[in-house]
């Protein structure tokens, strides 16, 4: 049980897919303009990670090395299709904004990377914990980036149509924060902050 907990916890900080493994960056930088988009993208990626890790781990003993990648992609694509259809049916406004990034979860480096590096080599329980941890780490970074970029770039945080935070009419938001340069600046700031915190923890 300690090992399962360690697998889950590693994905949040020690092996965070974005800040530590540096995979899945394209989607994170693109959709982190708002907190709301980060919530939906994070849940979608976490569901696919968790579900595909379980299935791939369950069938690993019967999956030949020569055909494992096509099988991984087929499994992942099946869960991405479920996410795509559910979001299109029940959350269409958000789905319309996220656009191509939902189908592209199929080839997201985090999903395929964990299938290859972890789920194909470990038990179902450990693979499920790894999927949840990686998903939680990915979602957490999206939420923090979304909060920083949305608040500084628009002066407010809007969630499900409700304004949660507002800096007031006198605030003039720098529009660069909701553009790609703002995404890189925010991501770099978070990486530096994590490095400082971890270095102080080791000293």
Image (tube, rainbow, N blue to C red):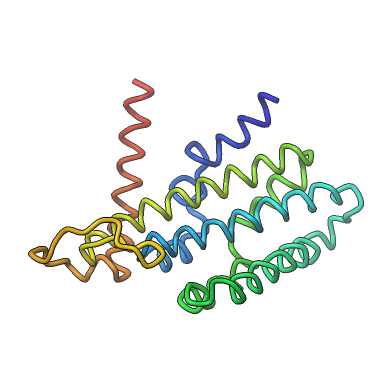
Image quadrant assignment for residue 145:
bottom left
* Residue at screen point 47% across, 45% down: 20
Depicted 202 relative to depicted 21: above or below: above
- Rendered-image quadrant of the N terminus: top right
* Residue at screen point 76% across, 61% down: 72
Left or right of 130 on screen, residue 184: left
Depicted 199 relative to depicted 21: above or below: above
Image quadrant assignment for residue 66:
bottom right
Image quadrant assignment for residue 167:
bottom left
- Rendered-image quadrant of the C terminus: top left
Residue 22, percent from left and from top: 48, 52
Left or right of 60 on screen, residue 11: left
* Residue at screen point 21% across, 59% down: 166
* Residue at screen point 27% across, 64% down: 182
- 80 or 90, which lies in front? 90
Residue 64, percent from left and from top: 88, 56
Residue 88, percent from left and from top: 59, 76
Left or right of 40 on screen, residue 172: left
Q: Residue furthest top?
A: 203
Residue 15, percent from left and from top: 52, 41
């Amino acid at each position: 049980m300690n090992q399962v907990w360690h697998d889950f916890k590693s994905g949040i900080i020690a092996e965070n897919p974005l800040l530590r493994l540096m995979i899945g960056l394209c989607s994170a930088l693109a959709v982190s303009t708002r907190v709301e988009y980060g919530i939906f993208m994070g849940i979608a990626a976490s569901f696919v990670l968790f579900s595909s890790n379980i299935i791939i781990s369950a069938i690993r003993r019967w999956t030949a090395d020569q055909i494992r990648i096509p099988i991984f992609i087929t499994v992942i694509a099946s869960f991405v299709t479920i996410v795509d259809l559910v979001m299109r049916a029940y959350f269409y406004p958000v789905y319309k904004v996220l656009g191509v990034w939902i189908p592209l979860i199929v080839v997201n480096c985090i999903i395929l990377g964990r299938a290859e590096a972890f789920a194909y080599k470990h038990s179902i329980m450990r693979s499920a914990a790894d999927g949840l941890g990686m998903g939680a780490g990915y979602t957490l970074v999206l939420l923090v980036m979304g909060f920083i970029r949305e608040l500084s770039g628009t002066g407010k945080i809007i969630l499900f149509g409700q304004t949660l935070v507002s800096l007031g009419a006198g605030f003039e938001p720098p529009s660069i924060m909701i553009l790609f340069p703002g995404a890189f600046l925010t991501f770099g700031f978070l990486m530096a902050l994590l490095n400082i915190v971890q270095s102080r923890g080791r000293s």
